[in-house]
Structure formats: C-alpha cells, structure tokens
Image (spheres, rainbow, N blue to C red):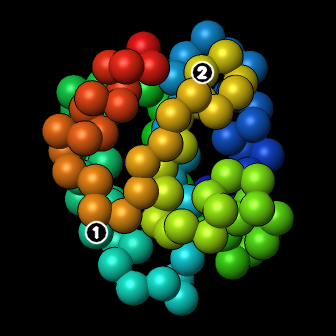
Amino acid sequence: MIHITDFNTAVLHLNQKKLILVKFYSGHVDNCGDLDITLESLEYDYPRVLMFAIDVDKDLSLIDRYTGNDLPMAVVFKNGAPSGSISRNATRDDLRALLEDVA
C-alpha cells in the first residue's frame, strides 16, 4: 500500500483500466490502523489492484466526497468511479468479496 499525501496522486491512476483501492483514514480516529493489516495481506493476492492510503486530515473535502465521516473507509474505484466500499471492522474475507464483486 502506498501512503500518499495528495489525492491527485491516486486520481492520476483512476483513469487507467485498473482497480484502485483507496483507504481513507484519520490520525485522530482510533483503530484506523487495523484496516492496514487486512489490506496489506491482500496486496499479494491482488497484485493488479493499486492500493493507496490517504490521511483525510490533510484534505477534509475527501470526507464528504467519499467516506461520509465513517473512518477508516476503503473505497474501490473502477474506470475512475467509486464502485464499492467497506469500512471499519472489515475482515480479509469481506475485502476479498468486495474486490471480486467489483472486478
């Protein structure tokens, strides 16, 4: 997972024909790191999915656009548009199912 500070970094990849998973988190919210372990374990199973993480504290507009204040949130983008999301206590199987459904 690539930690980015500017959402435009991920946007550059959204126009490609790849799945993009973006984890939105906040350093001010407890348990945001728990989702990292689950996502990082999936990187090996889904090498063609680009995974990014961004701290919404650096761009609060991302909360309204993508998370609805539910953090942490993983959003899958397909063909440049949000295609599914999962939050907080997602298990590896939950995320695997989301990626399979969107793919």
**Horizontal side, residue 35 vs residue 12: left or right:** left
* Quadrant of the image occupied by residue 35: bottom left
Residue name at image x 43 percent, y 26 percent: 49
Residue ID at (65%, 62%) = 68
Q: Amino acid at mark 1?
A: Asp
- Which residue: 62% across, 70% down? 69
Q: Which residue is mark 1?
A: 34
Left or right position of 17 against 93: right
Picture quarter containing residue 44? top left
Q: Mark 1 touching mark 2, by CB under 8 A?
A: no
Amino acid, disc 2: Lys
Residue 89 location (% of width, % of height): 28, 62
Q: Locate residue 78, reporting x and y percent.
A: 59, 21
> Circle 2 is placed at which residue position?
78
Dot 1: within a 10 Å radius of its alpha carbon, few (fewer than 14), some, or many (20 or more) residues? some
Q: SS at mark 1?
A: helix
